Image: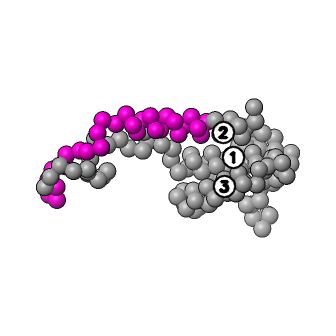
């Protein structure tokens, strides 16, 4: 089984578990009292300590989603011309979206660390797929 297939199965399993957790919440309506809440209605998330956080629901952080997307991108890179173009475009758009959420310079720092980890694990450069690591973001390559 390829890494890409494993990643797709993991993503599907994650989505299924997240749906199960969300649907198991007891009620969409919570009672809010205090200034500004004259009646029972749905509370905004910040007003209700009884609403579970994203982390409690198992929703991954933007940083872990960014890592997963990068690993999927690198797996596609390793496939070279064999990679599915539509899938590559979709993964690329996800990476761009997550870059905004993670923010710079954190995204670059983490990407460089994960790229080195990928090379150690896979024996292939994440940027070109060759068996030699190329740190394209180092000052030497600019």
Q: Which residues are magenta?
A: 10-37
Please, is residue 72 above or below residue 96 in the view? above
Earlier-in-chain disc, 2 versus 3 = 2
**On residue 83, which mark appears?**
none
Near-viewer residue (15 or 73): 15
Residue 95 picture location, percent across and down: 63, 56
- 105 or 73, nearer to the observer: 73
Image quadrant containing the C terminus: bottom right
* Cα separation between marks 2 and 1: 7 Å
Which residue does the image show at 26% across and 51% down from the upper left? 43
Residue annotated with mark 2: 7
Q: Position of residue 6 (x, y in %)?
A: 68, 35
Q: Quadrant of residue 90?
A: bottom right
Left or right, 107 with respect to 28, comes to right
Q: Residue at x 79, y 49 (%)?
A: 83
Label 1 and label 3: CA atoms lie apart by 11 Å
Residue nearer the viewer, 113 or 27: 27
Q: Are marks 2 and 1 in contact (CB under 8 Å)?
A: yes
- The quarter holding residue 24 reads top left
Residue under label 3, please give it: 90
Do the numbered discs 1 and 3 sit on residues whose CB atoms are within 8 Å?
Answer: no
């Amino acid at each position: 089984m390829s890494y890409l297939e494993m990643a797709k199965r993991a993503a599907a399993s994650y989505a299924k578990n997240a749906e199960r957790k969300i649907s198991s919440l007891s009620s969409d309506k919570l009672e809010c009292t205090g200034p500004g809440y004259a009646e029972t209605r749905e509370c905004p998330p910040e007003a209700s300590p009884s609403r579970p956080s994203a982390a409690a629901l198992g929703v991954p952080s933007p940083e872990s989603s960014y890592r997963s997307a990068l690993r999927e991108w690198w797996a596609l890179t390793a496939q070279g011309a064999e990679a599915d173009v539509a899938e590559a475009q979709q993964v690329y758009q996800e990476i761009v979206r997550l870059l905004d959420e993670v923010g710079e310079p954190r995204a670059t720092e983490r990407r460089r660390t994960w790229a080195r980890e990928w090379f150690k694990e896979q024996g292939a450069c994440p940027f070109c797929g060759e068996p030699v690591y190329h740190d394209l973001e180092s000052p030497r390559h600019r």
